[in-house]
Amino acid sequence: MTELYNGTRIDWYDYFMGIAILSEQRTEEHCYPVGACIVNDNKIIVGTGYNGLTNGCKNKKDRSLYVFHAELVALRNKNSRDVKDCTMYVTLFPCNHCANIIIQSGIKTVIYCNREFNDTKRVKAAKKMFDAAGVVYQSYNSIYNKRIPKDKYTRINYDEYFMGIAYISSKRSKSVVKKIGACLVNKNKVIVGIGYNGLTRGLDTIPTNCVNEEVPASYFEVCHAEINAILNNLCDVEKDCTMYVTSFPCNECAKVILQFKITTVIYMHEDANDKTEIAKNMFDAVGIKYRQCDVNIARIEIFK
């Protein structure tokens, strides 16, 4: 059984850059690894991407000319109407071509890892373009003091990627709740929603002054990762989506999954109890597929 995360809650910077770094690990072979993550003002992830080759161009001699950059892919994969005033987290400073698209899209902040190739002519041009357009950019390198070093680059598969997103998201769960993360993916392998367990918006802790014999603490509901992933999709949830979740859904989450016509649930861990048994009965009744995915944590772990 895969051991689930049970450590300290990660901060926003580590979370979003961690998603970009994990996305980087999906970069296609023969491309320089880069990942990107777009976040709106409400701290909701609205797009992710990684470097990849144009279809049919994998055998070309100068592959660099055929690469779709992570920033462009993240914008293509956005699950909101627009990305105006959003922040882009990217593992390498954007080139001038990507800077042009970032400016035109309305993104106002770029946070990047200070790595090699950050001082090329294209990067210098990008910085001048950002300065002229009022786009703020800043480096964020402290994540590398926490990141697990990789011996060599190995591309992760889709199951590892989407479950890795759910796993990293679980690290944002507050200490007072069970740490669970979820990632909602459409039939085109595009992430359309991400969530983690948390108290209702506006509550940092369960208000003890409100708890008594008539109103027990258990009545202050935790909003589960699965529901947050669905609610964080800023467009209508598409049919035939797959839910990746670090723990098998309870019966209440199963009801929501049914209503939004999600067709597949892939989970890492299961707490066998009456709630999960009822959830399975509900899934079986309507034909929702579910399977366990025992991901090797070492392949998707970003932090020490």
Image: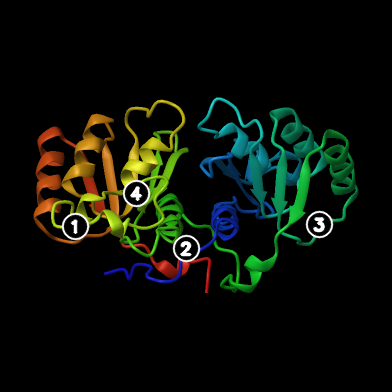
Q: Does residue 61 appear in the picture of this structure?
A: no
The answer to whether residue 181 shows anywhere in this view is yes
- Whichever of callouts 1 and 4 sits on the residue coming sooner in the sequence is 1
> In the image, what residue occupies the spot 14% across and 33% down?
286
Q: What element carries label 2?
A: helix
Query: How many angstroms separate mark 1 from mark 4 (CA)?
Result: 27 Å
Q: Name the residue under label 3.
A: 117
Which is more toward the observer, 68 or 231?
231
Identify residue type, mark 3. Phe
Q: Which colour scheme is used?
A: rainbow
Residue designated by label 1: 212
Which-is-in-front pick, marks 2 and 4? 4
Amino acid type of the residue that numbered disc 1 sits on in the rendered structure: Asn
What's the distance in space between the residues labelled 3 and 1, CA to CA? 59 Å
Residue at the image position 52 percent from the left and 74 percent from the top: 304
Earlier in the chain: of badge 2 and badge 4, it is 4
Quarter of the rendering containing residue 98:
top right
Query: For mark 4, what is the residue?
Result: 225
Q: Which of marks 3 and 1 is nearer the N terminus?
A: 3
Please provide percent x and percent y for residue 49: 58, 43
